[in-house]
Image: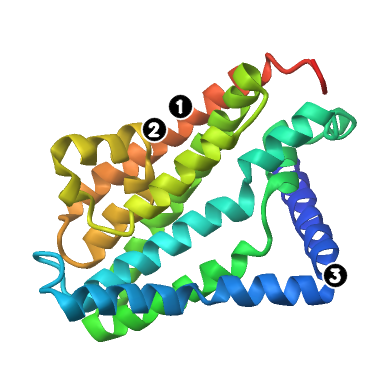
């Protein structure tokens, strides 16, 4: 019963967020259209890289498109659910204080109130790019199902990580520009194979900044670069990162005493 109530609350909030966004029709059209151009930017970037050079060693043109599409889905799913700057502003102003009195989890309330709905078109255009690249590579249905499961676990862990980091940023500095900067850095870096950053870099993007478990490793698995046993370890790691982030989120929220506090 509790889970059903939480899901209903989340869906209702998403509907309200979309109606609020679409109320300004021209502005909504411009933002949605601009974000949808991500697919052209991604294709153009990879085309230029492979047009003026031999590309990235060990990665074909369509494999790179697949990776960029996967990254776009991951990052924009996170942005859709959680905008750190917006979240911290709402905590700082006390805008969520009255909502916290309702019988819903604080995590659900904050996820429902802080995201960017316009990022949905970028995620959709990324999905189209990924599907196009997958059709050219010849990915089988079973592989795509496992890929989707890995991504779902990774994105969930990534969202919880960003939420915990955002609350920590609020407690320490009352702002989240740093967190937004970290997200942008991860977004830019994960458009390329993490192996180019060396072992240390790959470790950072796996454990400290978990973009790897949300996009890079799922892409590697479906492209045949990661064994099934290794993919299982990535899935378990995503669950562990998600669980740790969930615990830290609630620990940090204990330090929240109301807007301006």
Q: Earlier in the sequence, mark 3 or mark 1?
A: 3
Seen in the image, is 212 located left or right of residue 50? right
Instruction: Reply above or below: 104 against 196.
Output: above
Q: Mark 2–mark 3 contact, CB under 8 Å?
A: no
Q: Which mark is residue 240?
A: 2
Q: Which residue is mark 3?
A: 24
Q: Horizontal and vertical percent for residue 38? A: 48, 72
Residue depth check, mark 2 versus mark 3: number of the one nearer the observer: 3
Q: Which mark is residue 113?
A: none
Residue at point 45%, 27% (across, down): 244
Dot 3 crowding, Cα within 10 Å, few <14, some 14–19, many 20+: few
Q: Horizontal and vertical percent for residue 219? A: 28, 61
Q: Horizontal and vertical percent for residue 48? A: 26, 77
Q: Which residue is mark 1?
A: 244
Residue 199 appears in which quarter of the rendering?
A: top left
Instruction: Reply above or below: 133 against 28.
Output: below
Tell which of 178 and 138 is nearer to you.
Answer: 178
Q: Of helix, strand and loop, which one carries label 2?
A: helix
Q: Quadrant of the C terminus?
A: top right
Cα distance, mark 1 to mark 2? 6 Å
Q: Mark 1–mark 2 contact, CB under 8 Å?
A: yes
Residue at point 28%, 44% (across, down): 234
Tell which of 179 and 4 is nearer to you.
Answer: 179
């Amino acid at each position: 019963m509790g889970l059903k109530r939480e899901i209903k609350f989340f869906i209702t909030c998403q509907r309200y967020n979309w109606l609020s966004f679409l109320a300004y029709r021209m502005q909504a059209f411009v933002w949605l259209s601009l974000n949808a151009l991500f697919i052209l930017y991604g294709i153009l970037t990879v085309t230029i890289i492979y047009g003026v050079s031999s590309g990235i060693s060990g990665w074909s043109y369509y494999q790179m498109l697949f990776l960029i599409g996967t990254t776009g889905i991951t990052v924009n799913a996170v942005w859709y659910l959680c905008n750190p700057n917006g979240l911290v502003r709402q905590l700082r102003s006390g805008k969520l204080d009255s909502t916290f009195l309702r019988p819903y989890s604080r995590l659900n309330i904050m996820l429902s109130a802080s995201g960017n709905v316009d990022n949905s078109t970028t995620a959709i255009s990324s999905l189209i790019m990924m599907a196009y690249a997958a059709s050219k590579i010849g990915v089988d249905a079973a592989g795509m199902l496992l890929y989707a499961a890995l991504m779902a676990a990774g994105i969930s862990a990534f969202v919880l990580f960003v939420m915990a980091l955002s609350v920590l940023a609020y407690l320490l500095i009352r702002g989240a520009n740093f967190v937004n900067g970290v997200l942008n850095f991860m977004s830019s870096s994960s458009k390329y194979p993490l192996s180019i950053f060396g072992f240390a870099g790959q470790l950072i993007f796996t454990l400290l900044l978990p973009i790897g478990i949300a996009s890079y490793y799922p892409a590697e698995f479906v492209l045949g670069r990661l064994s099934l046993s290794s993919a299982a370890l990535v899935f378990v790691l995503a669950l562990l990162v998600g669980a740790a982030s969930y615990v830290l989120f609630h620990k940090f929220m204990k330090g929240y005493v109301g807007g301006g506090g």
